[in-house]
Image (cartoon, grey):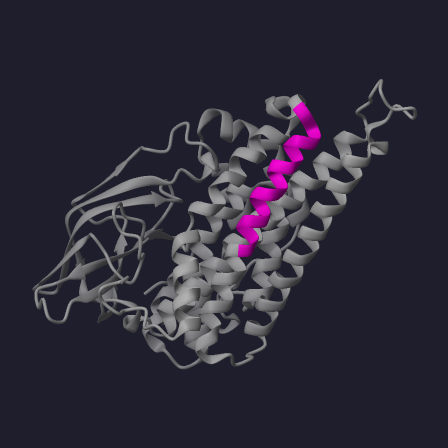
Amino acid sequence: MAVITQPRTLENLQEIYEKCAQRAPQYDRENKFFHEDFEDLREAGYLLMPVPEELGGFGMSLAEVAQKQRELAYYAAPTALGVNMHLYWIGSAADNWRRGDTSVEWLLREAAAGKVFAAGHAESGNDLPVVWSTTKAEKVEGGYKFTGRKSFGSLSPVWSYLGIHALDDSDPENPKIVHAFMPRESSGYEIKQTWDNVLGMRATRSDDTILNGVFVPDQYILRVVPAGFKGMDGYIAGLFFWFLTGISNVYYSLSRRVFDLTVEKIKTKSSIALTKKSMVHHAGVQMDIGELFMELEGVEAQLNFIANQYSSGVDYGPAWPLKFIAMKGRVMEANWKIVDKALDISGGFGIFPSSGLERLIRDARLGRIHPTNSYLSKELLGKANLGVDFDTQPRWG
């Protein structure tokens, strides 16, 4: 078992944020993982934010961690997005540990000792992530063997444990989802570099991981639950809450950065057709800037409300998942609207890397592909409000 150490003080974060901003263009241009950012943040204790104080961390709530992620994302959204893939495992574990769930304590102790957790959820052909799987889990003596392919594996260069899930259908009438953590020293897997020159968020190095019958011992099997939404216990549901809040704040802050940069640039743009010459006096520009500001204010208010209500222990019961899903959906729609309109306002200048906008616009595009995507979000929200069980088969019709 890992030894708990006292957490380092979260200090000099503003200085770290600014260094992250300086390095971001190079990471993007060279398809490099944010190693320097990661080490600076780790040294500052950033990865320990949700770990309970009793176990060696800072004991920060969902709302508090979300605020820090928002700050970081304003300067380097890919770095914040990558780090989120560690924080959400720890955050959900911390919440459940405080409720008396001791099965996650080892995870928190490992995080306190400096271990890094990452997500191996995404799979081709699976549009119901976490609750179903195209990866196969086979029960063997002392643990499980896992066979399949995981995509979008952010933090591939640095994770200590890859959180994976897979389907055990040995009993076809009662399929199970097996949730496990694969240690990096395991044999039988391969990290395949697939992330070069992707549209955006290149610094996350979200490469694929191929599982070729990887053995994971029982000590790292966290849950074996019924397949489908009925298998979502407190920890699994908490993963969604922390994940959706984290990515929503990252993309909100990215939108805010695009807005601020657009406002800054438009103040230097002139027009020979305007009496006052400056484009700030263009009626269309004024209307667009006002509209985008309203979008940002509304999104920020929703993000703050959801995170604060959850962290304060407000009980919405089964409505909680709906609130997080709706929050994520609204943020991503606003994100696209803001960056699209920002390019309209900026004009052709915005497509050049030197503008500062081009990279941010590409990064922003990835917001919609994160679970839950638009299709699944609307499906779940519609079914919930119409009283249709999520696990009803056939799925439609």
Q: Magenta segment range?
A: 330-347
Instruction: Give the percent coordinates (x, y) of residue 385.
Output: 44, 72
Q: Which quadrant is home to the C terminus?
A: bottom left
Name the residue: 55% across, 73% down: 310
Name the residue: 44% across, 29% down: 31
Q: Which quadrant is home to the N terminus?
A: bottom left
Of residues 181 and 148, the one drawn nearer to the viewer in this rendering: 148
Q: Quadrant of residue 338?
A: top right
Q: Is residue 281 left or right of residue 78?
A: right
Q: Is residue 185 above or below residue 91?
A: above
Q: Is residue 30 above or below residue 117?
A: above
Residue 4 in view of the camera: no
Q: Is residue 327 above or below residue 281?
A: below
Residue 23 in view of the camera: yes
Q: Quadrant of residue 205?
A: top left
> Is-magenta flag for residue 395?
no
> Is-magenta flag for residue 334?
yes
Q: Is residue 297 left or right of residue 157?
A: right
Q: Residue furthest right?
A: 275
User: How many dots with numbers?
Assistant: 0
Q: Is residue 340 left or right of residue 87?
A: right
Name the residue: 58% across, 68% down: 306
Instruction: Give the percent coordinates (x, y) of residue 280.
Output: 83, 33
Instruction: Give the percent coordinates (x, y) of residue 304.
Output: 63, 64
Instruction: Give the percent coordinates (x, y) of residue 136.
Output: 15, 55
Of residues 4 and 70, the one drawn nearer to the viewer in this rendering: 70
Name the residue: 63% across, 68% down: 305
Q: Is residue 283 left or right of residue 14?
A: right
Q: Is residue 226 above or below residue 298?
A: below
Q: Residue furthest front?
A: 397
Of residues 256 and 7, the one drawn nearer to the viewer in this rendering: 256
Kindly report the secondary structure that dominates the magenta region of the rendered protein. Answer: helix
